[in-house]
Image (spheres, rainbow, N blue to C red):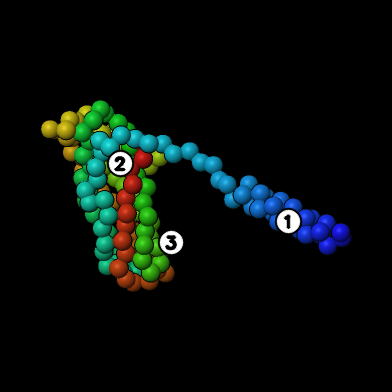
Amino acid sequence: MRAKLGVVLLYLLLIAVGIGATVYFNIKGSVEVIEGNITVSPQSFSVDLAKGVEYVKKITVQNSGPEICVYFEDLVEGPSPDKIDVSYKDAYGNSIYSTKKLCLPEGSKDLPSNTAVNVHLDVDKNSENGKYTIYIFVRN
């Protein structure tokens, strides 16, 4: 009888741990979905970078929908991605970020609006030389 009680208690303990793990690792988040009217060209690019350099890449943002204000986020892959600072500027040198967005004029499927954006890469002097890939994401 004690053996059965021990097995039942062990079973209940495992269920409680499983429920606790499920609750512990269940993460809620919010995702804002924007219409597929915006395209970035190129959306990613690779470049060989050396320590301490600055690199600028021009990209084009197309909007085939109503006017919308956006900013950019990125993911850097390479030997030392945390040592690469990525920033965005419009054609006039104004910085673009989450609280200072770039407003894209209205466009249509037949005639999308085109806006040039400069992607600035500042490479730390303590970074590793090598090939880096930058992936760009549009947010609003």
- Which numbered dot is residue 42? none
**Residue drawn at (41%, 36%), measured in percent from left and top?**
32
Mark 1 to mark 2 CA distance (whole Å): 62 Å
- In the picture, the disc for residue 94 is 2
Total number of numbered discs in the rendering: 3
Q: Which residue in the protein does label 1 denote?
A: 11
Is the Cβ of the residue at disc 2 closer than 8 Å to that at disc 3?
no
Mark 1 and mark 2 residues within 8 Å of each other at the beta carbon:
no
SS under mark 3? helix
Q: The C terminus appears in which quarter of the rendering?
A: top left
| Residue farthest bottom in this picture | 129
Q: Foreground residue, 76 or 127?
A: 76
Give the residue type at disc 2. Answer: Asn
Residue 129 shown left or right of residue 92 in the figure: right
Residue 99 x/y as whole percent: 41, 37
User: Which is closer to the viewer, label 2 or label 3?
Assistant: 3
Q: Amino acid at mark 3?
A: Asp
The mark closer to the camera, 1 or 2, is 1
Locate residue 88 relative to residue 10 in the image: left or right: left
Note whether residue 56 is visible. Answer: no
Q: Residue at x 24, y 45 (%)?
A: 40
Q: Position of residue 6 (x, y in %)?
A: 82, 60
Callouts 3 and 1 close, C-beta under 8 Å = no
Name the residue nearer the viewer: 5 or 118.
5
- Is tag 1's residue or tag 2's residue first in the polypeptide sequence? 1
Q: Quadrant of residue 28?
A: top right
SS state under label 2: loop
Q: Nearer the viewer, residue 106 or 28?
A: 28
Judging from the image, what secondary structure is the residue with disc 1 in? helix
